[in-house]
Image: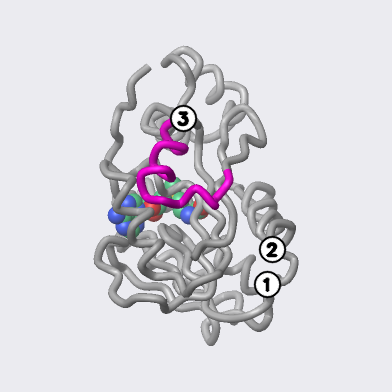
Amino acid sequence: MDRILEPELMDDPKQAAAYAQADFAEENQAFVECFKEYFPEFSQGLVLDLGCGPADIPIRFAKLYPSCRILGIDASAPMIQLGEQAVKQTGLADRITLRCERLEEVAGARIVDAVISNSLLHHLPNPLQFWQKLRQLVKPGVPVLVTDLLRPESPEAAQAIVDQYAADEPDILRRDFYNSLLAAFTEDEIGSQLARMNLTRLLIDIPDDRHWVVGGIIY
Ligand SMILES: C[S@@+](CC[C@H](N)C(=O)[O-])C[C@H]1O[C@@H](n2cnc3c(N)ncnc32)[C@H](O)[C@@H]1O
């Protein structure tokens, strides 16, 4: 099945609210713990979360790493508003900054000590812009952890995944999950992107039937 793009930004307020209210606690906690397993030596600095959404991962990251500051970027104004409320409620506003900005427009070079990103890449028409920006923003020798959905082999297989893992979710979330699966990349496509960007030090792992993980130190 070829990739079918979905709208790039999640900037419909209802869509952003449904996403923020969904229970991604287990998945998001697993993401930050996966970072700790990949990079046991890492402890401090400025961490960039690309496509941070409603900031659940920046909050969990800040709690796990008390010596880190987190900068979350997302180009959806409703997502950033929800994220700012959540950050304020947790009292972490001194260490988490959120910016409503397209990742392609983030300025600077060699400014961050780690990059994290979950479930963003499938939104992008041109994924190479993501890897290029990531490479531009990191200091040499820092950890990178990127995860996202895997594209199934057919629309029927995508529907089966939605039915298996999101049976009880609201329609809007089930629709977005289905569209995201169709827009996602395959393992081979991610491998080609890394090769084209000369990022083959980053390794791809497929932890389950619907996700890929790319992690490693970037120079
Ligand atoms: C599926 S959400 C993931 C949010 C968060 N990372 C999480 O795991 O909960 C993807 C987010 O990427 C944002 N996004 C898509 N394209 C973007 C771009 N070019 N620049 C910045 N954010 C973007 C969307 O607005 C959306 O909030």
Please state, as top left, top right, bottom left or bottom right, where the N terminus lies in the image.
top left
Pick out the residue farthest to the bottom.
94
* Observer-nearest of 169 and 188: 188
Q: Secondary structure at mark 3?
A: helix
Do the CB atoms of the residues marked 3 and 1 lie less than 8 Å apart?
Answer: no
Asked whether residue 103 appears in the rendered view, the answer is yes
* Observer-nearest of 191 and 185: 191
Q: Which residues are magenta?
A: 188-203
* Observer-nearest of 92 and 102: 102
Q: Dot 3 surroundings within 10 Å: few (below 14), some, or many (20 or more)?
A: few
Q: Is the distance from the Cβ of mark 2 to the nearest ligand 1 atom less than 8 Å?
A: no
* Observer-nearest of 213 and 135: 135
Residue type at mark 2: give it. Answer: Phe
Q: Is the distance from the Cβ of mark 3 to the nearest ligand 1 atom less than 8 Å?
A: no
| Mark number displayed over residue 42 | 1
| Mark number displayed over residue 71 | none
Residue type at mark 1: give it. Answer: Phe
Mark 2 → mark 3, Cα distance in angstroms: 25 Å
Q: Secondary structure at mark 1?
A: loop
Q: Position of residue 162 (x, y in %)?
A: 53, 25
- Position of 124 with respect to 42 (left or right) is left
Do the CB atoms of the residues marked 1 and 2 lie less than 8 Å apart?
Answer: yes
| Mark number displayed over residue 39 | 2
Q: Position of residue 207 (x, y in %)?
A: 66, 36
